Image (cartoon, rainbow, N blue to C red):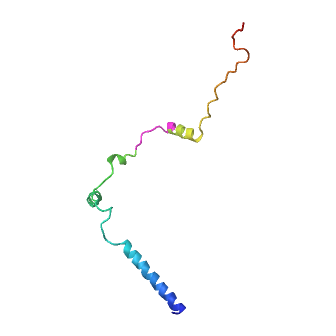
């Protein structure tokens, strides 16, 4: 075979293998994902599957309190000072005889 015919043969084989790979990705069979079709169809035909309370746009809250919390996260308070350490210098208070 000549070099050109080998190149043409490789190009044709790669083109056909690309089609075969696409065909193998779309074959029909039973998989582990099969079996939820009844639930899927019932949810698909539901008029409004969301919770009715999800439409509530009036969220109760205090803006000043929320701003204070946000500032607390942005600028955390300084850590408390370390506890005072007492050092006793001198005798233990016991007498020797």
Left or right: residue 41 compared with residue 61: left
Closer to the camera in the image, 42 or 8: 8
Percent position (x, y) of residue 88?
Answer: 70, 18
Q: Residue at x 50, y 91 (%)?
A: 5
Closer to the camera in the image, 14 or 59: 14
Residue 56 is covered by the magenta coloring:
no
Percent position (x, y) of residue 34?
Answer: 30, 62
Left or right: residue 65 compared with residue 33: right
Furthest residue toward right: 90
Left or right: residue 28 compared with residue 63: left
How many labels, in total? 0
Q: Residue at x 30, y 66 (%)?
A: 30
Furthest residue toward front: 97
Magenta stretch mostly in which secondary structure?
loop
- Indicate the quadrant containing the C terminus: top left, top right, bottom left or bottom right: top right
Q: Is residue 30 above or below residue 83?
A: below
Q: Quadrant of residue 53?
A: top left
Furthest residue toward bottom: 2
Percent position (x, y) of residue 10?
Answer: 49, 85
Q: Quadrant of residue 75?
A: top right
Percent position (x, y) of residue 13?
Answer: 45, 83
Q: Is residue 37 above or below residue 75?
A: below
Residue 60 is covered by the magenta coloring:
yes
Q: Residue at x 32, y 64 (%)?
A: 31
Q: Residue at x 37, y 46 (%)?
A: 56
Q: Which residues are magenta?
A: 58-65
């Amino acid at each position: 075979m000549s070099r050109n015919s080998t190149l043409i043969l490789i190009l044709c084989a790669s083109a056909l293998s690309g089609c075969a790979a696409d065909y193998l990705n779309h074959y029909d069979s039973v998989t582990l994902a099969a079996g939820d079709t009844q639930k899927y169809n019932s949810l698909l035909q539901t008029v409004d599957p969301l919770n009715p309370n999800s439409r509530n746009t009036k969220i109760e809250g205090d803006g000043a309190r929320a701003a204070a919390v946000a500032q607390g996260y942005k600028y955390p308070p300084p850590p408390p000072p370390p506890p005072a350490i007492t050092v006793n210098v001198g005798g233990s208070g016991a007498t020797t005889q």
